[in-house]
C-alpha cells in the first residue's frame, strides 16, 4: 500500500477504502474521503461509521475535496491532519507545483505581506498563466483554491480551539476583511463562523491556548526528545523525556511568548499550549511547531528508501527549529566542538545577550538574542564568552544578513538561494550550510558530507570516509538523505546493505 502514498502515483481507491475501514493512522493526511451521501469529507482515521464503498470518493488534498463540493467533517477535523509533502518529483512541472504549494503552505514565506498568485509567480520566475496551468495539472486545483482551503481550515481550527474574536480569526487566517471571511466561510462550509463556534470555542484559560496536532506513526518520540534535550539551552527550552514534553520560548516579529508540547504517542498526536500573546499568529506558530517536531513526515515513503540500510528506525524524525536564525547561530557555535561544549557556549550567549521573559513554565526564563542585538555585539564581548575570532565574525555576519532581510532561514525559503547566501558569509562552510538546510530550511535531502561522525558511521570498518565517499555511499538515500543522516548518527540503527 506504500505505493498509494507516492506523490506521482494516482490514488488506489480500493487500498484507500481498506485504510478507511481500518482507521489506519499511517495514512492520515495522505488522502481524504468524500462521502457523497452526506457531502462531508473526512480523514482516514475518522471514527464515524465506515461509509458504503459506492458512496466514497478519494482525494489527495483537502482542497480537491472542497473543490468537489464537500465540507470538512466536524468530528475528525481535516485541519488537524498531517500535511502531505511531496519531494520526489523528477520533471520540471511537478517540481514547480510542489515548490508553489510549499510556499503557499508556509506563513513565514511571505513576511508581512499576503500571498497572492501574482506574487507567487514572480517569486518562482514564471508567468501567472503558466503557474496556474501547471499547478492545476499537477495538483488538481488552482493556486487560489489551494490557498483558500488553507485559510479556511486555519480559521476553522482557530474557531474551534481558541476564544479569539471572529474578526481576529479572519485576520490571523489571512483574510483581508471580516466581510470577505464570512462570505467565503458560508459559501464553502454552508454555515457561518458563529454557527461553527456554537459551543463558544475553547474554554477561557489563563494558562495559554490549547491546540491539537496529529502525526503519522511510527514516531520515535523518545529519540526526538533526547536529541533536543542534549542540545537544550538553559532558560530557553526545557525537555522532559520521560514525561514526553518539550517547552520553550518563542519570538514572532515583536511578540515574545512561550509554548509547551506534550506527546500522546498512542493517539498519534501532540497537545500544544501556546501563550495568549501569540494567539493572533497561531497559524504561524502551528506551522513552525509542525516543522520543529517534523510532524508532517511520511514514514512509509521514507522507509521505503532507507529501510534496507536502517531496517529498525522507521520512527526517527529530523528535528527542526522554531527559529531559523537561532539554529544557524547554534550551528556556527557547534563547528568543530562537541555537542556539550556547543551547548555551554550557546547558554553563555543567551545569558549575556538574551532578554528575560516571565512564563508559567518552570525553567523557561529567557529569549534568544535577536539578529539586531548580535549584529551590534562587539568582538570583545563575544570573545569573552569563549568564542574564537572566526566564530565571532561568522555570527556577526550571519546576524547582519538576517537582520537586513538579505537572508531568510525558514521552511518556505528557497534552499539553493539560502545555501548560496550562507556559504558566501565568512566562517560558514558547506557543513554548516547543509546542517542549517537540514534543520532550519527543512530540506529532506540535506547531507553534511563533511560531518566526522557521519563519515565514521558510514565506513564499513569504522575508519573515516572522505566526504566524496560518504556522498557516494548515501546516493541511494535520495531524496531522503537528511533522514539517513539522523539514522546514521545513531550507530545501532545502521545496517549497511551491499546494494
Image: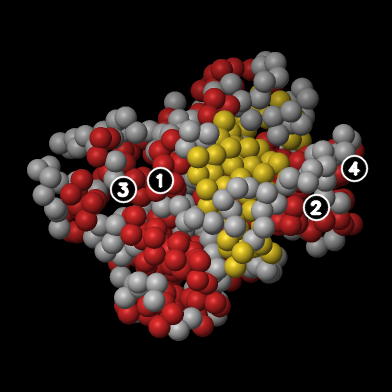
Task: Report x, y in % for residue 481.
Answer: 33, 49
Q: Quadrant of the N terminus?
A: top left
**How many angstroms separate mark 1 from mark 2 (CA)?**
35 Å
Left or right side of 399 for 187: right
Describe the element under mark 2 as helix, strand or loop.
helix
Dot placed on the residue nearer the N-terminal end, 4 or 2: 2
Task: Report x, y in % for residue 112.
Answer: 68, 69
Describe the element under mark 1 as helix, strand or loop.
helix
Q: Residue drawn 9% across and 43% down?
A: 461
**How many angstroms separate mark 1 from mark 4 (CA)?**
43 Å
Q: Which mark is residue 194?
A: 4
Instruction: Check whether the beta carbons of the residues at disc 1 and disc 2 lie within 8 A of each other.
Output: no
Dot placed on the residue nearer the N-terminal end, 3 or 4: 4
Instruction: Check whether the beta carbons of the residues at disc 4 and disc 2 lie within 8 A of each other.
Output: no
**How many angstroms separate mark 2 from mark 3 (CA)?**
40 Å
Is residue 150 visible in the rendered image? The answer is: no
* Closer-to-camera residue (154/371): 371
Q: Which residue is mark 1?
A: 227
Q: Which residue is mark 3?
A: 485
**How many angstroms separate mark 3 from mark 4 (CA)?**
48 Å
Describe the element under mark 3 as helix, strand or loop.
helix
Amino acid at each position: 500500500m506504500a505505493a498509494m502514498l507516492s506523490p506521482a502515483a494516482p490514488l488506489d481507491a480500493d487500498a484507500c477504502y481498506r485504510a478507511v475501514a481500518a482507521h489506519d493512522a499511517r495514512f492520515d493526511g495522505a488522502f481524504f474521503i468524500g462521502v457523497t451521501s452526506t457531502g462531508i469529507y473526512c480523514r482516514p482515521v475518522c471514527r464515524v461509521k465506515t461509509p458504503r464503498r459506492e458512496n466514497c470518493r478519494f482525494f489527495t488534498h483537502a482542497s480537491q475535496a472542497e473543490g468537489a463540493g464537500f465540507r470538512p467533517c466536524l468530528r475528525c477535523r481535516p485541519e488537524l491532519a498531517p500535511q502531505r509533502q511531496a519531494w520526489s518529483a523528477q520533471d520540471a512541472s511537478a517540481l514547480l507545483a510542489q515548490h508553489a504549494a510549499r510556499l503557499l503552505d508556509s506563513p513565514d514565506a511571505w513576511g508581512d505581506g499576503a500571498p497572492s498568485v501574482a506574487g507567487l509567480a514572480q517569486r518562482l520566475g514564471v508567468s501567472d498563466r503558466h503557474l496556474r496551468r501547471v499547478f492545476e495539472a499537477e495538483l488538481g486545483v488552482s493556486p487560489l483554491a489551494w490557498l483558500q482551503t488553507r485559510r479556511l481550515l486555519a480559521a476553522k481550527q482557530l474557531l474551534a480551539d481558541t476564544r479569539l474574536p471572529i474578526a481576529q480569526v479572519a485576520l490571523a487566517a489571512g483574510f483581508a476583511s471580516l466581510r470577505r471571511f464570512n462570505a467565503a466561510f458560508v459559501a464553502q462550509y454552508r454555515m457561518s463562523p458563529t454557527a461553527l463556534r456554537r459551543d463558544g470555542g475553547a474554554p477561557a484559560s489563563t494558562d495559554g491556548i490549547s491546540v491539537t496536532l496529529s502525526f503519522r506513526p511510527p514516531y520515535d518520540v523518545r529519540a526526538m526528545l533526547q536529541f533536543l534535550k542534549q542540545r537544550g539551552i538553559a532558560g530557553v527550552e526545557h525537555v522532559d523525556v520521560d514525561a514526553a514534553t518539550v517547552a520553550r520560548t518563542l519570538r514572532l516579529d515583536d511578540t515574545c511568548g512561550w509554548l509547551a508540547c506534550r506527546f500522546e504517542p498512542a493517539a498519534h498526536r501532540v497537545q500544544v499550549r501556546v501563550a495568549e500573546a501569540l494567539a493572533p499568529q497561531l497559524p504561524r506558530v502551528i506551522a513552525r511547531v509542525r516543522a520543529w517536531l517534523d510532524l508532517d513526515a511520511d514514514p512509509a515513503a521514507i522507509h521505503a528508501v532507507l529501510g534496507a540500510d536502517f531496517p529498525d528506525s522507521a520512527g526517527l524524525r529530523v528535528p527542526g527549529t522554531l527559529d531559523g536564525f537561532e539554529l544557524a547561530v547554534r550551528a556556527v557555535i557547534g563547528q568543530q566542538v562537541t555537542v556539550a561544549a556547543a551547548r555551554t557556549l550557546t547558554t553563555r550567549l543567551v545569558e549575556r545577550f538574551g532578554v528575560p521573559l516571565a512564563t508559567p513554565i518552570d525553567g523557561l526564563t529567557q529569549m534568544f538574542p535577536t539578529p539586531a542585538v548580535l549584529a551590534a555585539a562587539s568582538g570583545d564581548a563575544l570573545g569573552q564568552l569563549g568564542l574564537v575570532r572566526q566564530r565571532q565574525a561568522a555570527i556577526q555576519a550571519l546576524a547582519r544578513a538576517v537582520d537586513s532581510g538579505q537572508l531568510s532561514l525558514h521552511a518556505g525559503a528557497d534552499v539553493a538561494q539560502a545555501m548560496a547566501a550562507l556559504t558566501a558569509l565568512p566562517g560558514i562552510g558547506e557543513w554548516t550550510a547543509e546542517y542549517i538546510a537540514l534543520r532550519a530550511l527543512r530540506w529532506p535531502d540535506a547531507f553534511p558530507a563533511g560531518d566526522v561522525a557521519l563519515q565514521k558511521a558510514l565506513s564499513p570498518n569504522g575508519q573515516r570516509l572522505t566526504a566524496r565517499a560518504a556522498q557516494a555511499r548515501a546516493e541511494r538515500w535520495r531524496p531522503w538523505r537528511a533522514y539517513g543522516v539522523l539514522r546514521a548518527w545513531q550507530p545501532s540503527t545502521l545496517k549497511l546493505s551491499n546494494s
